[in-house]
Image (spheres, grey):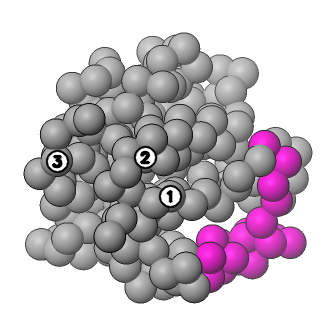
Amino acid sequence: MAIKIFIDQGHNPTGLHNAGAVGNGLYEGDINYQAGIYLANLLANDYRFEVRLSRPTPTTVLGTNTSTSLAERVRMANQWPANYFISLHCNANVNPNVNGSEIYIYQFNTQSNWLAQHIMNGIVRNTRLRDNGIRENPSLYVLRNTQMPAVLVEMGYLTNFNDSVILRDNLWNVAYGIYLGILSYFGFMPL
């Protein structure tokens, strides 16, 4: 029986409600979308997984505002029902020196926590992104309302030049790192 993984590409397309952060000429909704496509293709080509995306096309728009957009992502994952929920995001900060990846979870010492650690290890091993750690944030809607282990991956900072270059030019490597982290969590070897 295949493991069902729901990939949520955070935010909506550029110019719409809930479009996300902007930095160094990059738009979060676009980066999240493409990272999700890369990750979904990796998982779809691995018989051990079944995968669904929150945004299967670049023009997919979820909800009519931020609240309904978040609710729709959670509804899709819960209704499937997915075994795991992975939400992909990019970060931003007023200080352009802030950089690195961090992963948010609902609670420490849970399956989400262990999955997040494996994903972080995969990202850091596969890219030049810095490990900013696993962070507990029970207030995040998608972590609070999903009925399966869920992680929210902040892949890097669009506002940091070095991170933005990685997210622009080596996004497949970021997605591949996430994929390797998922495999590691399950104790699987790459095919």
Q: Using the image, tell me which numbered label, if any, was put on residue 51.
A: 1
* Element under disc 1: strand
Q: Residue 91, can we see it?
A: no
**Who's the residue at 57% across and 60% down the image?**
52
Which class describes the residues within 10 Å of circle 3: few (<14), some (14-19), or many (20+)? few
**Quadrant of the image containing the N terminus:** bottom left
Q: Residue 189, can we see it?
A: yes
**Who's the residue at 36% across and 65% down the image?**
2
Label 1 to label 3: alpha-carbon separation: 17 Å
Residue holding disc 3 = 188
Q: Which residues are magenta?
A: 58-76
Confirm or deny contact between disc 1 and disc 2 (CB under 8 A).
yes
Amino acid type, residue under disc 3 in the picture: Phe
* Element under disc 2: helix
* Residue 91 in picture, x, y percent from top left: 51, 42
* Residue 185 in picture, x, y percent from top left: 17, 54
Which class describes the residues within 10 Å of circle 1: few (<14), some (14-19), or many (20+)? many
Instruction: Tell me: 169 left or right of 174.
Output: right
Amino acid type, residue under disc 2 in the picture: Leu
**Quadrant of the image containing the C terminus:** top left
Label 1 to label 2: alpha-carbon separation: 7 Å
Q: Earlier in the sequence, mark 1 or mark 2?
A: 2
Residue holding disc 2 = 43
Q: Was residue 65 drawn as part of the magenta stretch in this picture?
A: yes
Label 2 to label 3: alpha-carbon separation: 12 Å
**Who's the residue at 49% across and 33% down the image?**
157
Amino acid type, residue under disc 1 in the picture: Val
Looking at the image, residue 34 lies above or below residue 44: above
